[in-house]
Image (cartoon, rainbow, N blue to C red):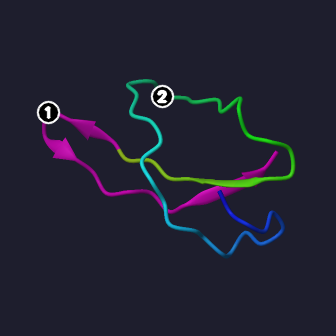
Protein backbone atom coordinates (compact mmCIF):
# COMPACT_ATOMS: atom_id res chain seq x y z
CA UNK A 1 0.00 0.00 0.00
CA UNK A 2 1.24 3.44 -0.80
CA UNK A 3 1.28 6.27 1.71
CA UNK A 4 -0.07 8.83 -0.76
CA UNK A 5 -3.18 7.68 -2.63
CA UNK A 6 -2.79 10.40 -5.28
CA UNK A 7 0.78 9.44 -6.23
CA UNK A 8 0.74 6.47 -8.60
CA UNK A 9 4.46 6.85 -9.33
CA UNK A 10 5.80 6.16 -5.84
CA UNK A 11 5.82 2.38 -5.49
CA UNK A 12 6.54 1.14 -1.96
CA UNK A 13 8.39 -2.08 -1.16
CA UNK A 14 6.29 -4.93 -2.57
CA UNK A 15 5.59 -8.00 -0.45
CA UNK A 16 4.05 -11.35 -1.33
CA UNK A 17 0.35 -11.08 -0.59
CA UNK A 18 -1.25 -14.16 -2.02
CA UNK A 19 -0.49 -17.19 -4.16
CA UNK A 20 -3.40 -18.56 -6.17
CA UNK A 21 -4.19 -20.70 -9.18
CA UNK A 22 -7.05 -18.38 -10.20
CA UNK A 23 -6.89 -16.21 -13.30
CA UNK A 24 -8.68 -13.30 -11.58
CA UNK A 25 -8.54 -11.76 -8.12
CA UNK A 26 -10.79 -9.35 -6.21
CA UNK A 27 -9.40 -7.59 -3.13
CA UNK A 28 -12.31 -6.82 -0.79
CA UNK A 29 -10.37 -5.51 2.22
CA UNK A 30 -8.82 -2.32 0.82
CA UNK A 31 -9.89 0.78 2.78
CA UNK A 32 -11.33 3.64 0.72
CA UNK A 33 -8.76 6.24 -0.31
CA UNK A 34 -5.79 3.86 -0.04
CA UNK A 35 -3.65 3.15 -3.10
CA UNK A 36 -2.64 -0.50 -3.41
CA UNK A 37 -0.06 -1.78 -5.91
CA UNK A 38 -0.26 -5.21 -7.53
CA UNK A 39 2.05 -7.27 -9.70
CA UNK A 40 1.69 -10.84 -10.89
CA UNK A 41 3.71 -13.64 -12.42
CA UNK A 42 2.86 -17.02 -13.85
CA UNK A 43 4.20 -20.42 -12.91
CA UNK A 44 3.85 -23.74 -14.66
CA UNK A 45 5.77 -26.97 -15.21
CA UNK A 46 8.47 -25.02 -17.08
CA UNK A 47 9.17 -22.73 -14.13
CA UNK A 48 8.25 -19.25 -12.93
CA UNK A 49 7.95 -16.27 -15.23
CA UNK A 50 9.07 -12.69 -14.59
CA UNK A 51 7.05 -10.27 -12.45
CA UNK A 52 4.72 -7.90 -14.26
CA UNK A 53 5.08 -4.14 -13.89
CA UNK A 54 3.35 -2.87 -10.76
CA UNK A 55 -0.12 -1.40 -11.33
CA UNK A 56 -2.29 0.43 -8.82
CA UNK A 57 -5.78 1.63 -8.09
CA UNK A 58 -7.37 3.74 -5.39
CA UNK A 59 -10.52 2.24 -3.84
Q: Is disc 1 placed on a helix, strand or loop?
A: loop
Q: CA distance from mark 1 to mark 2?
A: 17 Å
Residue drawn at (47%, 42%) of the image: 17
Q: Residues within 10 Å of mark 1 (few under 14, many from 20)?
A: few
Q: Earlier in the sequence, mark 1 or mark 2?
A: 2
Position of residue 42 measured from the top left corner of the image (x, y, whole percent): 33, 42
The answer to whether the residue labelled 1 contacts the one labelled 2, judged by CB atoms less than 8 Å apart, is: no
Q: Residues within 10 Å of mark 2 (few under 14, many from 20)?
A: few
Q: Quadrant of the N terminus?
A: bottom right
Q: Residue furthest top?
A: 22
Mark number, residue 45: 1
Near-viewer residue (41 or 27) = 27
Judge whether residue 1 is colored magenta.
no
User: Mark 2 — residue?
Assistant: 23
Left or right of 34, for residue 21: left
Residue drawn at (68%, 63%) of the image: 2
| 37 lies above or below 6 | above
| Span highlighted in magenta in the image | 42-59
Judge whether residue 52 is colored magenta.
yes
Amino acid sequence: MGANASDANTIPELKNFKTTKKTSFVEDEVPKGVRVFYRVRAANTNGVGPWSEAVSKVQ
